[in-house]
Image (spheres, rainbow, N blue to C red):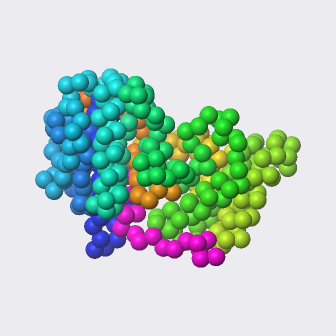
Amino acid sequence: MSASAGVCPNIAVTMGDPAGIGPEVVVKALADSQISGLARWTVAGNVPVLHQAEEITGLRLPETVTIIDPGVPGPEPFKIGQVSAAAGLAGLACVRAAVELCLEGRADAIVTAPLSKEAVTLAGERFSGHTEYIAALCGVADSRMLLVNDRMRVVHVSTHVPLRAACEISTERILRTIELGREAMDRLGVDNPRIAVCGLNPHAGESGLFGDEDGRFIAPAVELARAKGIRCFGPLPADTVFLKAVRGEHDLVVAMYHDQGHIPMKLLDFEHTVNVSLGLPILRTSVDHGTAFDIAGKNLADPGSMKAALKLAAVMAARRPRRAAWETS
């Protein structure tokens, strides 16, 4: 991937939970000359924590990288590798600072390092994930998660909710997910994508034998999307649709819930899968791994996912969004 010629976007990067591997992968990724030249980077993070990550990795952030310190505590109140409320608050402060940069027009995108939901919860904050938290900061009630790697792309109708709640699907939400996925494919440079929509039940319901949700909610959403000029198909059995996507038959898969989409993506390429938030007024990509407290501070963290997230943010930020077909109908 490469950003469009002549376009150098401004991109904010968060350090993640300071007790996890976030600061290390940020330093490792931005120290790579193939990454540092893709954009003008601003890291939202505590300066002592980032210096500590430099000492751990033996690398230095390029002088061209700007650091904004949101005033969170230094490394003293928390210990590397341990969950704490202080670290959770520090990580959230960085996210808020990066979001403000985008909302003020000073950044074109955000790339986030991982946070610990447990640490944030200990701090007394409601947090089910970056996507939902950033959506709330932006005043948006409806957002989606897209996973991207070099071999497949999956957008989810629901993510961080109980499975029972995820099964309470609606035609409107499925249609909106298809539309957001189609718009994202534009920014990924895929014209007129072939979108496969998963069924909810085994074998997509087997004509109602295994449940009627596929016929009642998913099939109507597919028909409405097709009427809007979107090339999509379904509901299709989820046990075969991902294999067909990997083989090149589909450009995007719409998964009905978190594990339906995450399991094949992480099995396929865990290290280089990128999380993209859709439905927000700002562009956000992220690593698709956690804080890895067990290896934090040991210089063992692989920056591959962070590099992929930075590259994708640069590519998508450099592309001007085109007016979606369904918005002209």
Q: How many marks?
A: 0
Q: Residue at x 30, y 47 (%)?
A: 97
Residue extending furthest toward the front = 139
Residue 317, horizontal then vertical, whole percent = 37, 64
Q: Specify the segment rendered in magenta.
A: 309-329
Q: From the viewer's side, name the closer residue of 135 and 313.
A: 135
Q: Quadrant of residue 105?
A: bottom left
154 drawn magenta: no
Examine the rendered structure and indicate whether residue 241 appears above or below residue 315: above
Relative to 19, say whether 144 is above or below: below
Rendered residue at 30%/55% (across/down): 101
Residue 247 in picture, x, y percent from top left: 60, 57
Give the residue at x 45% y 70%: 321
The image shows residue 320 at horizontal and vertical percentages of: 41, 71
Image quadrant holding the C terminus, namely bottom right
Q: Residue 232 lies in what quarter of the image?
A: bottom right
Given residues 257 and 73, the one toward you in this image is 73
